[in-house]
Image (tube, helix red, strand yellow):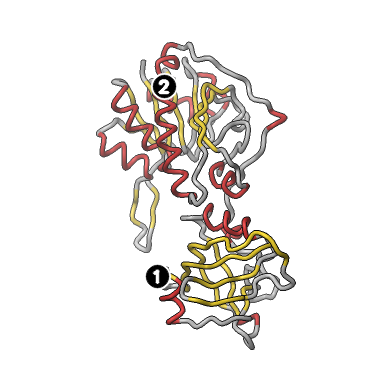
Amino acid sequence: MRVLFLGSGPFGIPALRRLHEGCSDRVVGTVPDARQGRNRQSSPCPLKAEALKLGLEIFETERLKGRSGTEFLQRTAADLVITADIRLILGKSFISSVALGCFNLHGSILPRWRGAAPVVRALLAGDEEIGVSLYRMVPALDAGPVVGVSRWTPPARVTGEEAEQYLSERAAELLMEHLPALLAGQAELEEQDDAAATLAPKIDKLEGWVSWKKSAAEIDRQIRAFDPWPRTRALFCSQGQEEGQAETLILHKIRVESESGEHEFPGTVMEVVSEGILVSCGQGSVRIECLQRAGKKPLEAADFLRGMPIAPQDRFLDGPPPSKGGTGK
C-alpha cells in the first residue's frame, strides 16, 4: 500500500519522519518552491526541505481540486493519504477517489477549533487542555469522523511556538498508533458533534496589537500565543508627547503582576524597576520583562531602559497607530 503524505508547513515534519521510518512505500506531496527575500530566490517549504533530507520521492502541485487533483493523485498512485499543515484545499473528487481515504492531523481536540490556527486560538482562549486529532477528511472543513485524539495540559507559560512543536510530536505518535488500522481500512471512526464546533480562523497581523482595556491575563495569553508570529505590539507615548508621535514597541515577555483591580486609565506606567515595567490593564496589571524597538534586538527590561528611559505616568496606547490618512487600520 502506498502512502502519500501531503504537507507544507513544519507541523507535519515529525509525522513525516516517523512515517519514513515505519512505512516502506511512501511519497510526499507538497507545494512548489516560493520566491522569497530581496533576491526572490526559490526556497522550498519546510516539509519539502525535510523530505529532501530524507531522500523521499516528491510530487508538487498548486491545486488539489478538480482535474488537477485527480491527475496529481494518479501520478502519485496513492492508496492512503495523510495530510498535515497543507495550505491547499482538497477537492471533493480527490477525497472520494483515495481507496483507503484521506486523513488529517489537526492541532486541536475536535470539534473545538476547526480551521487554520487551532493552537494559537486555543492559547488565546486560555484552554486548559489542548491536543491533536486524527480524522477522516470530508468536504466540510475539519468536520470528518475522528480516528483518535491526543490530549495535553500545557504549562502555564507555554508559547505558541512551544505548543506547536510539542503537539507536532504528539501528532506523529498519534499517526503511528493508528497507521496499521488505516492501512488495513479498519480504523474505528467517531462522528463529531457539529453543535459543539468552534472556529479557528487564520491569524490577522492586526490582532497582534495590544488593547490595554483587556485584562492582564488576556494580554499575557496574547503575547505568548503570538510568539513567534505575528508578535505583540504596543504604542508607547511619554509624558508631554503627542499621541501621533507614539513609538511602536514589540513586547516579547511579560509577567502578570495582578489579576484583580480595575484601572481608570489602562496602559499607564505604574512603576519602573530593573526587573520590568509595571503597566495597568483593564483588570489587573502586567510587568513587561523583555521588549524591542523597531529595527533593534529584543532586550531585557534593565538593558532596554538604559537606551530608552521610561517613567511612571508614561502611557502605552491601544494600537494600531492611525494611518497617514487619519482613519487607522
Could you tell which of marks 1 and 2 lies nearer the N-terminus? 2
**What residue do we see at 30% from left, 28% from top?**
20
Q: Which residue extends farthest right? A: 264
Direction from residue 317 to residue 152 in the image, left or right: left
**What residue do we see at 53% from left, 14% from top?**
188
**What residue do we see at 72% from left, 30% from top?**
195
Instruction: Say which element carries label 2.
Output: helix
* Residue 245, percent from left and from top: 60, 82
Direction from residue 63 to residue 215 in the image, left or right: right
Q: Which residue extends farthest bottom? A: 240
Q: Is residue 1 positioned above or below 208 on the image?
A: above
Instruction: Say which element carries label 1.
Output: loop
Q: Is residue 275 positioned above or below 158 on the image?
A: below
- Where, quadrant-wise, is the C terminus in this rendering? bottom right
* Residue 216, percent from left and from top: 63, 60
Amino acid carrying label 2: it is Glu
Amino acid carrying label 1: it is Lys
Judge the density around disc 2: few (<14), some (14-19), many (≥20) Cα neighbours within 10 Å: few
Q: Is residue 50 positioned above or below 157 on the image?
A: above
- Where, quadrant-wise, is the N terminus in this rendering? top left
Q: Is residue 220 positioned above or below 25 on the image?
A: below
**Real-space Cα separation, disc 1 to disc 2, in angstroms:** 43 Å
Direction from residue 165 to residue 124 in the image, left or right: right
Residue named by callout 1: 297
**What residue do we see at 54% from left, 35% from top?**
89
User: Looking at the rendering, which quadrant does residue 280 occupy?
Assistant: bottom right
Residue named by callout 2: 177
